[in-house]
Image: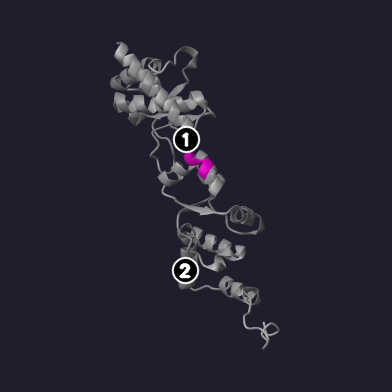
Amino acid sequence: MKKRLNRERLNVGRTTYAERVKSILKNARSKPVQELLVDQVRKRATGAQCDEMSWIEISQMALNLMNEQADVAYVTEQELQFRPDVLDNIRSDGYEVVVITEQQKTRLDAQPFTGGPQVRTLETYVQEYNTSFEYKFVDYVNLTNEESRIYDLMPRILALVGIAGNRIPQIRVSEIMRVTTDNTEGVWDSSIPAIVIRRSKLASLIGYAATLLHETGHATTGTMDATREFEEVLTSYLGHTATAAINR
């Protein structure tokens, strides 16, 4: 720095002191400084981030600090656009979605291999989500009379949207769905493969029918939640159902 500070220069470029500032921030252990760094991560969306956050080492440090302090999931702009189904699940599970750059994600993905912490990126969350499912299947003979009555309406419900015969996917009933936050009512699990519906949905025809048709849309078309393609499937189901009701 002394070499650059001479009488002939009126201004000193940021590169002159950048490494010194980086060193100060990297070694900062005080809670107020760490909280300010985390706050800078959230300011990206408003365009009010400080210049120091453009330094990849400092932004990576701030993202790791945020991961320690809050339940967050890091996604890129591209993932935000093309994986709305996963983002919906992330938010439903109570995580804050934080948008990062591709460069930041590359650094975060690499750090566990060099002894750094594992943070929750989109891929990490998908792994957590998939492994969180744990079923306790209920055999048909163990359903109550009312549950059996509602379950047995399955062919008639699916016929309303033109699905019959060998096009009907396997339907299974489970007491539980996930070992974590269990707010899932139904799922198309391609690994079984079967539609799994939570037993509590058999308490009413409307709840069962809604979940059954929703998951059938996934099972028969391969479309994902929160996408235009899946909306078109559900819209088609509405049209088929209205037509069947009017014709009768």
Q: Which mark is residue 36?
A: 2
Residue 33 at least partly seen = yes
The magenta stretch is 81-85
x, y percentage for residue 125? 52, 45
SS category of the residue bearing label 2:
helix
Q: Label 1's element?
A: loop
Q: Amino acid at mark 2?
A: Leu
Quadrant of the frame with the N terminus: bottom right
Quadrant containing the C terminus in the rendered view: top left
Q: Nearer the viewer, mark 2 or mark 1?
A: 1
- Which amino acid, mark 1? Thr
Residue visible at 38% across and 18% down in the picture: 240
| Residue at image coords 51%, 53% | 99
Q: Nearer the viewer, residue 91 or 138?
A: 91
- Callout 2 crowding tier (Cα within 10 Å): few <14, some 14–19, many ≥20: few
- The quadrant holding residue 214 is top left
Q: What is the x, y in percent for residue 59?
A: 56, 63
- In the rendered image, is residue 124 in sight? no
Out of 124 and 146, give the one closest to the viewer: 124
80 relative to 101, above or below: above
Give yes or no for residue 40 being in the magenta stretch.
no
- Label annotation for residue 227: 1
